[in-house]
Amino acid sequence: MSIFVKTSPGNFRTLLWITFFGIAMGYFESAAVIYLRNILYQPATELFPLVPISTHLAITELIREAATLVMLIGVGIIAGRTNSERFAWFIYTFAVWDIFYYIFLKLLIGWPASLLTWDILFLLPVTWTGPVISPVIVSFSMIFLALTIVYFTNFNINTKISLRVWIFLSIGAFIVFLAFIWDYSRYILHFFTLRELWSVPSSKALFDLSQQYVPVSFNWGLFSIGMIIILFSTLLFIKEQNNINK
């Protein structure tokens, strides 16, 4: 299957410019991380344990992450012709951004040392961690799904993601999310029970504890199950669309 079959010149330009945008965002993100590490006087090749930072800086970083998501969603909304295609362009831009973020970090500061190097992936709603290869795998699966949606939308502008595909996608994504927060959650629950987390008298105690966190293990089993379900949902989408377009 070629995504360029029945693709108008306008859609090809969209693909090209969104790819450029994702690459550019990847560079900006990597530059921001390099600046942040230098400001904190942390060696560029070391990430854990985290250098203590002020609450103000932590909140600023959280807002920056939220702003990045708004930018990526905005690209999807502007570029897409339908809700399904808007979703496709959003995850495509997200994936390209993420992949090139690591590429530029490697080129600029030689980090990560390998694809198994641990990284902090997100801070919302809790800390996500995992070996670099894990978000890269997710990104390639997102590109595959996104281009598949765009391909079928070019055949039929009324192309939609069915409810059952959404259900499988959501389940797979949630399981992958659990894999990313598994080790951090295990660490926090070593010090607090779930009940205690709801009644922590001061967020500073939890914040200080988080800065001492060093990843130990990644739940590859959970991650693999989630990715298999996501791949299945993509193949299910392809099957449904082939049946519709016969």
Image (cartoon, rainbow, N blue to C red):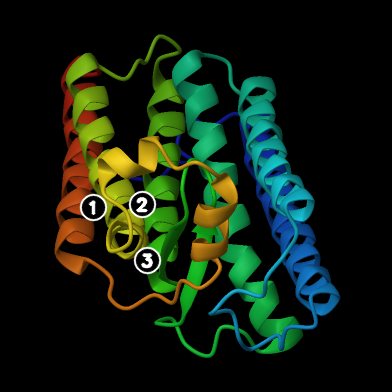
Residue 242 is situated, as x and y percent measured from the top left of the image, at 21, 26
Residue occupying image coordinates x 48% and y 32%: 88
Q: Residue furthest front?
A: 201
Q: Residues within 10 Å of mark 1 (few under 14, many from 20)?
A: some
**Toward which corner of the image does residue 214 lie, by quadrant?**
bottom left
The residue tagged 3 is 134
CA–CA distance in space, label 3 to label 2:
11 Å
Disc 1 + disc 2, Cβ < 8 Å:
yes
Residue occupying image coordinates x 40% and y 9%: 158
Residue occupying image coordinates x 67% and y 50%: 22
CA–CA distance in space, label 1 to label 2:
8 Å
- In the displayed structure, 179 sits above or below 41; it is above
Residue occupying image coordinates x 51% and y 73%: 212
Q: Secondary structure at mark 3?
A: helix
The residue tagged 2 is 141
First in residue order: circle 3 vs circle 2: 3
Across the whole image, how many numbered discs are drawn on residues? 3
Side of 12 relative to 222 (left or right): right
CA–CA distance in space, label 3 to label 1:
10 Å
Side of 233 relative to 113 (left or right): left
- In the displayed structure, 173 sits above or below 51; it is above
- In the displayed structure, 193 sits above or below 125; it is below
Residue 114 is situated, as x and y percent measured from the top left of the image, at 47, 88
The residue tagged 1 is 227
Q: Residue furthest top?
A: 158
Residue 155 is situated, as x and y percent measured from the top left of the image, at 40, 21
Q: Amino acid at mark 3?
A: Ser
Question: Residue 208's mark?
Answer: none
**Toward which corner of the image does residue 80 lie, by quadrant?**
top right
